[in-house]
Image (spheres, rainbow, N blue to C red):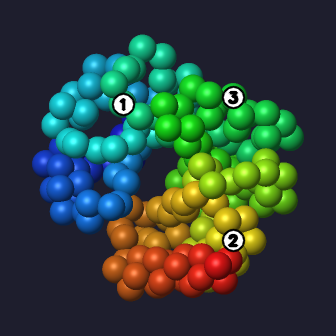
Amino acid sequence: MTSSVRMVDLDKARALVLGAPRDLLTVAVFYRPTRAHVEAVRDAVPFDLFQAEPESLDGIDGIEVLPVVHDRPDLASAVAGAAEMSGGGRVLVESAGHGGRGAAPDWSRVAAVGNLDRVVVAGGLTPDNVAGVVATLRPGGVDVSSGVESAPGLKDPILMESFVEMARSGAREVV
């Protein structure tokens, strides 16, 4: 298990999930977890989805998966393959490498994937650009972390509120 400035302990994770609105999907994010770690978290925290690299998903059953696909030239086929392994058909697309760096994928390559209603887009999103990304791509969801931080691992409530407001604004532009 790799440590991160964004990692929270089980008690805090449980409180966050239990305090979330019921219509909001909660996602446990892992980076190269062991099966035992995922199962321990699953037993302690009632999250909806398990997000990790596809190679980390072997042998983990009973949890809907949100596999991570990194931007690459064959993105459309990679997304299709990851969607097949996902219990709900959802896939998260982010920049090449691993997340948490604030780097955006090639949005034109993401758009070329086609129907994005089951795709969560991530990487480089901020309150300043999320409305345009949502209005243009019409994804099934957006993921943000560093784009709403005042320092690594420190979420800024004002940036978070602005991000949600702007994401909703972009969604309204689509309708």
The amino acid type found where label 2 is placed reads: Val
Gap between marks 1 and 3, in whole Å? 18 Å
The disc at residue 81 is 3
Image point 39% across, 42% down: which residue?
49
Image point 55% across, 43% down: which residue?
90
Residue 17, given in percent of the width and then of the height, sits at 23, 54
Mark sitting earlier along the chain (3/2):
3
Disc 1, SS? loop
Gap between marks 3 and 2, in whole Å? 24 Å
Image point 62% across, 28% down: which residue?
84
Mark sitting earlier along the chain (1/2):
1
Q: Are marks 1 and 3 in contact (CB under 8 Å)?
A: no
The amino acid type found where label 1 is placed reads: Ile
Disc 2, SS? helix
Left or right: residue 156 compared with residue 78: left
The residue at which mark 1 appears reads as 63
Q: Are marks 3 and 2 in contact (CB under 8 Å)?
A: no
Gap between marks 1 and 2, in whole Å? 29 Å
Disc 3, SS? helix
Residue 104, given in percent of the width and then of the height, sits at 69, 60
Left or right: residue 22 compared with residue 148: left
Q: Quadrant of the N terminus?
A: top left
Q: Is residue 135 above or below residue 87?
A: below
Q: Nearer the viewer, residue 4 or 113?
A: 113
The amino acid type found where label 3 is placed reads: Gly
The residue at which mark 2 appears reads as 133
